[in-house]
Amino acid sequence: MEIDPLIFRLSIFILSIFVGYYVVWSVTPSLHTPLMSVTNAISSVIIVGAIIAGLSGNSDTIFSTSTIFGFLAIALAAINIFGGFLVTQRMLAMYKKKKKDKK
Amino acid sequence: MISANLSAIFYLVSGVLFILALRGLSSPETSRQGNFFGIVGMVIAVVVTFLSTDNFSVGFIYVLIFILLGGSIGAFIAYRIPMTAMPELVAGFHSLVGLAAVFVAIAAFLNPQAFNLGVPGKIKLGSLIEMSIGAAVGAITFSGSVIAFLKLQGIMSGSPITFKGQHPLNAIILISIIALIYLLCSTQSANLFWILLGVSFLIGFLLIIPIGGADMPVVISMLNSYSGWAAAGIGFTLENTALIITGALVGSSGAILSYIMCKGMNRSFFNVILGGFGATDEVKGSSTKEQRPVKSGNADDAAFLMKNASSVIIVPGYGMAVAQAQHALREMVDTLKKNDIKVSYAIHPVAGRMPGHMNVLLAEANVPYDEVFELEEINNDFANADVAFVIGANDVTNPVAKTDPQSPIYGMPVLDVEKCKSVLFVKRSLSPGYAGIDNDLFYKENTLMLFADAKKMTEDITKNL
């Protein structure tokens, strides 16, 4: 009997929860704010679904209800992707070590 | 055109890169590289999607236009946002993830052929279940985050909004969501899909309004988690590994952060979710207030104490950020260091309005991160330090949490500030903090209250040093 591909996806999902659990516990508390902004950015990989929806029309139906929702979702996710990664980068650039030559 | 198998492998690669992006955050040195991995993962996912749809006609142009449009808005916000406003920004971003998930679910429901999910009215059962769960969680994330954003921004009052029958109402709505998903899957009715979305928006709104301003760190973390589960739900619908992995990562990340925040406040998760904290306590705090003697001093006294100290621990709180005193504080610390005084910073887990917020604010003021310590790391050092300088923090230093089982904050981990030889407490007045309770520290023999605006007082002390 063949296994439903859903089971494989479910396995990936469950294992990823465990990976996430251990990886996030190892994040230093001082970087919890960048952690939130970067998780925000990566969860916007949902843009792949939005792109598929946006590209689903042919030349006559570029703007159907479904593609319009796709386009809107693309814009929302893009705000998050650019905003999330850039603000994370901006924050991380501020974390500096003590200057040894100062004293 | 690339094969479905090849694109699945690429999605897996970008999922792994996202894991590495989070892994990088284990230390500030590796974090920038981690962020780079995240960006690469995202680029791979987007490019592979374009290649696998293999449709570079007019639609492709529009997709690019919308990416550029959103991207430039995002980039503009990212460069302009002040670091004090990070909690609002993150709440706002969560709402966008939620809404994007809802929109993708709508698109998939209206045009399932594009996603290989069947035809309208005959969507594959499994896909429909996943889609409706993703849409419902996305809608809850959206409306919940909007409320959190409004509360943080101060547009909506931070005090909890409660009414009679709130919890039964919420319970009924949550049950009706499950019933709606069941009905939707058996009838495939478009109307039920819209009702489901409407009800989910409503419950997100109702779940967050009773939660008070002080609990916002938990709320933001929780919504972070929801946005992950929403993404995962859509990931199952689209059979996309990158989305499933990411959703699981973000979901567990948010859950862990909520747990850490709850622990920092010694509150159970359910206690926070049920809400109402802060409203009743405020009344109690003002009525039981009694007059007790306090010692108050000026900048000169504070400067004298610090000049004669050999080690100083700074305890910053959200009040410091409100007063924009972080730069003035760092200047004061620089002067102290020139006098060979050892200075370190002590950060409570719930200092600030979101996890790690205070660390970002100090980093922005050029405070080296290796001078900043977490509660467990530094709590034993207070007994050996000469001066504790509390600026903008209150409840997190209250010894009552250790001594009085009657106190609402009893059992909450606090910084052992009172063990210092002397305590300098910068505050505008003797008013109680968020938890609405009096701070015993004010009346201790070795505490000197500095009644002033945090920024002005810090600048004055620096002048007197």
Image (cartoon, coloured by chain):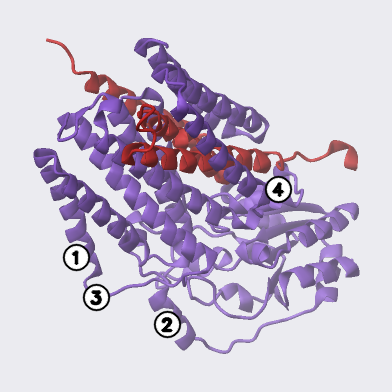
Chain colours: A red, B purple
Q: Is residue B32 visible?
A: yes
Of circles 4 and 3, the one toward us is 3
Left or right, A56 with reference to B31: left
Q: Badge 2 is on which residue?
A: B284
The residue depicted at 35 percent of the width and 13 percent of the height is B4
- Asked if both marks, 4 and 1, belong to the same chain, the answer given is yes
Q: Are there few (<14), some (14-19), or many (20+) residues within 10 Å of tag 3?
A: few
* Sequence-earlier tag: 3 or 2: 3
Q: Nearer the viewer, residue B95 or B37?
A: B95
Q: Provide the secondary structure element on which disc 4 rests.
A: helix
Q: Chain of mark 3?
A: B
Mark pair 4, 3: CA separation: 44 Å
Q: Amino acid at mark 1?
A: Pro
The residue depicted at 23 percent of the width and 27 percent of the height is B117
* Sequence-earlier tag: 4 or 1: 1
Q: Name the image quarter holding the N terminus of chain B.
A: top left
The spot of residue A24 in percent (x, y) is 48, 36
* Sequence-earlier tag: 4 or 3: 3
The residue depicted at 27 percent of the width and 19 percent of the height is A8
Q: Badge 4 is on which residue?
A: B363
Q: Is residue A28 visible?
A: no
Of circles 2 and 1, the one toward us is 1
The residue depicted at 9 percent of the width and 41 percent of the height is B187
Q: Amino acid at mark 2?
A: Lys
Q: Chain of mark 4?
A: B
Left or right, B126 with reference to B28: left
Q: Chain of mark 2?
A: B
Q: Badge 3 is on which residue?
A: B164
Q: Badge 1 is on which residue?
A: B168
